[in-house]
Structure formats: C-alpha cells, structure tokens
Image (cartoon, rainbow, N blue to C red):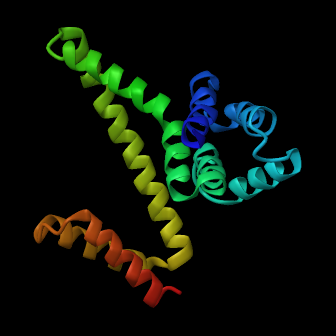
Amino acid sequence: MIYWQLFLAFFIPGIIGYGGGPASIPLVENEVVSNYGWLTVSEFSEVLALGNALPGPIATKMAGYIGFQEAGVLGAIVATFATVAPSLILMIGLLGILYKFKDSPKVKRMTNYIRPTIGVLLGIMAYNFFAESYVSAGLVQTIILIVASYLLMEKWKVHPAYVIVGALVYGAVFLA
C-alpha cells in the first residue's frame, strides 16, 4: 500500500502542478506533510533545501529522497517514476499524434522550421561550453579536448559516451 501512496503523492502534483518542479512543491508538501504525514513542515523544508542545493530537477530529487525514506530503494523508484510519469504520458501521446500526421504537409513544414532553430540552439550551447572551457581550463586544454573529441568521433567512429568518459578522466587527471 505504501508504494501506491507514494505513487499518488507524487503523480497528482505532477499532473496538476503546471510550471514544473517549483510550481508543484506546495502540492507535494500538501501530500507529504498534510495528507500522509510522512514529514513535518520542518523536515520538508530541510528536504527542499537539500534538493535546491543539488543539481537537477527539484521534484525528482525530493521524490527520490522521500520515497527512499518511506519505502527504501523501490519506494524511491516508484516516487521518482510518479514524478516524471505525467510528462512521459503526455510526450508519448503527443508523439503518437505527430506520428499519425507525419506525412501531412503542415507537419513537414513545421519540422523544417524547427530544425534550424534546434541547430542554432545547439550552436549557442556549444559556444557557451567552449567559452566556459576556455575560461576555466585554458586555451591549450580546450583545443586538446576539441581535437581529440573530433578525431575520436568523426575519424575513428568512437561512441560519444566513451568520448565523454574519456574527457572526464582527462579532466580529473590533468585539470584537477
């Protein structure tokens, strides 16, 4: 029964909490503190502060922590899944509709308009990563990582996950 309660406690705020994690925090507090009594207001504020201190979406971090506290690892999995399930269900539904109309001229035109936008956003992100790397690691280290990554992925067809792990190891050894 605790797993079902955990699921409901985080699924309902995910559905009605329009605006993402920050908008759903009061709804989660209502479920966790008032409805189920798993935490006091003070404990909830500590979990909220801990969740804000860590990187990533706040709602999933809080769900994982509270789920683990109440029902162990499986509780953390259930609560975290319940947090992302509304978005997942909506995405699957919207993709189903998009796939149904994939041959429509309007959908094709929309896709053609979206591609350049995504390209520009990725370019801006890459530039920001380069600028941050240049400032924090220096020009020589940045060029080494760029050239090595390019050669590994484009010339030798190494999977990007291995390149990322390699870059992390390189950073830990040479930039720490």
Relative to residue 175, is residue 161 depicted above or below?
A: above
**Lateral position of residue 125 relative to residue 93, left or right:** right
Relative side of 136 to 116, left or right? right
Which residue in the rendered view is the most extreme toward the left?
156
- Against 125, residue 165 (above or below) is below
Along the viewing direction, whichever of 6 and 94 lies nearer the viewer: 6
Query: Which quarter shows the N terminus?
Result: top right
158 or 97: which is nearer to us?
A: 97
Residue, x 81% and y 55% (percent of image)? Answer: 46
129 up-or-down from 41: above or below: below
At a point 38% along the width and 46% down the height, the residue shown is 122
Indicate the position of residue 20 as horizontal and vertical percent values: 61, 33
Q: In the shown orientation, is residue 159 left or right of residue 26?
A: left
| Image spot of residue 118 (x, y percent) | 35, 37
Q: Locate residue 127, reporting x and y percent.
A: 44, 56
User: Residue at 34% of width from left, 74% of height from top?
Assistant: 165
